[in-house]
Image (tube, helix red, strand yellow):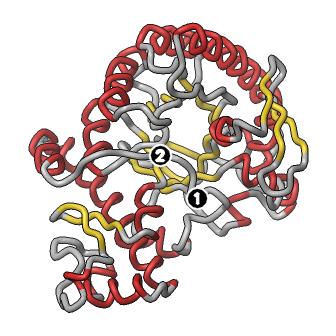
Amino acid sequence: MALPHATVQTPVFMPVGTQATVKAIPQHLLEELDAQIILGNTYHLYLRPGHELIRRMGGLHRFMSWPRALLTDSGGFQVFSLSELRKVSEEGVSFRSHLDGSSHFFSPEHSMEVQIALGADILMAFDECTEYPADFARARSSLDLTLRWAQRSKDHFTVHRQQRPWAGEFDGETQSLFGIVQGGMFAELRRQAAESLVEMDFPGYAIGGLSVGEPRALTREIIESTLPHLPADKPRYVMGVGYPDEIVEYAALGVDMMDCVLPTRAARHGLLFTSEGRLNIKNRRFAEDAGPLDPECRCMVCARYSRAYLRHLFVTQEVLGAVLNTVHNLAYYLDTMKAVRDAIELGTLSALLSRVRARDVVGGSGED
């Protein structure tokens, strides 16, 4: 997948950098871990420090000193999460800031303006994330609104993408806008959404509105039933998933892009992913364990620090503990996805999937 700032090998896992930072890890370490593309959050960056400030600073890449690819979400999921602070209309969403209660309004056009100002490689169409559970009528109404917003997003983006996000650097014309498939937990609505978006001819398509409280099996069912309706020759992105076994399973189904805050959020809570399964580093049994966190992992943490030391950092609430845990979890995720790419090339993906399933269970989403 050729993008202005990088050619991204797919399938790819994208670490989430909600507020222009992947929590607890600096950009040079992300590069060393070979993160090809990371996410920024339109809602949060709009509120603080503001998209116009970021534009004046040279765009999000320059502002956060990230030379590789960036994707910005539309802000729809975050507005959805403000259930007590928002009002949805045909024109867009009025909401109050979770920071200071100030009033704001997001329309598809405004979401495009903010994202163009941020200057990401991939932008997302403004959508309404349907809550779970939602009955068919509610999901149908929400989907219809999302499709109208998708067309408005595309129309605005098409006109305004000629503007350079910042003078002298990459031309806004090379940015890409992806559509987002909604439709709740109804396969028929998801099919209709996919077909409508394909008619709009986006360069890539995301499956959104998942990991919002539904059972894990239902998440997979919706992904599996939706993918055949999206073109295989364009990027297919599942938003907000998942655990290591999930990202391998979804890649095996044909998903090209995935993101999730899980590796970083879990790291800050002492939950670590290893070749031996999940490990809670705060467990007393690690207090005198001189072995590496994961004997099969080649990351800088496993090469240098013991489980006993990592437990000590966690129980004493030292900031370094969160940093080292995050480095390892991201290394595990990114290495897992590299193993998927290698297995696809070698024709051994089913064997890899069996091994990963044996050590991981259940999934998650959100912002970090």
Q: Secondary structure at mark 2?
A: loop
At a point 24% along the width and 88% down the height, the residue shown is 287
Q: Which quadrant does the C terminus fall into?
A: bottom right
Residue 223 quadrant: top left
Q: Dot 2 surroundings within 10 Å: few (below 14), some, or many (20 or more)?
A: some
At a point 14% along the width and 45% down the height, the residue shown is 346
Residue 284 sits above or below residue 168 on the image = below
Query: According to the image, label 1 marks what residue?
Result: 17
Residue 292 sits above or below residue 252 on the image = below
Task: Give the mark, 2 or 1, whose residue is nearer the N terminus.
Answer: 1
Residue 151 in the image, given as x and y percentages of width and height: 71, 17
Query: According to the image, label 2 marks what residue?
Result: 365
Q: How many angstroms separate mark 2 from mark 1 (CA)? A: 13 Å
Question: Is 64 positioned to the left or the right of 339 in the image?
Answer: right
At a point 59% along the width and 47% down the height, the residue shown is 71
Residue 365 in the image, given as x and y percentages of width and height: 47, 46
Q: Are marks 2 and 1 in contact (CB under 8 Å)?
A: no
At a point 27% along the width and 55% down the height, the residue shown is 336
Residue 48 sits above or below residue 268 on the image = above
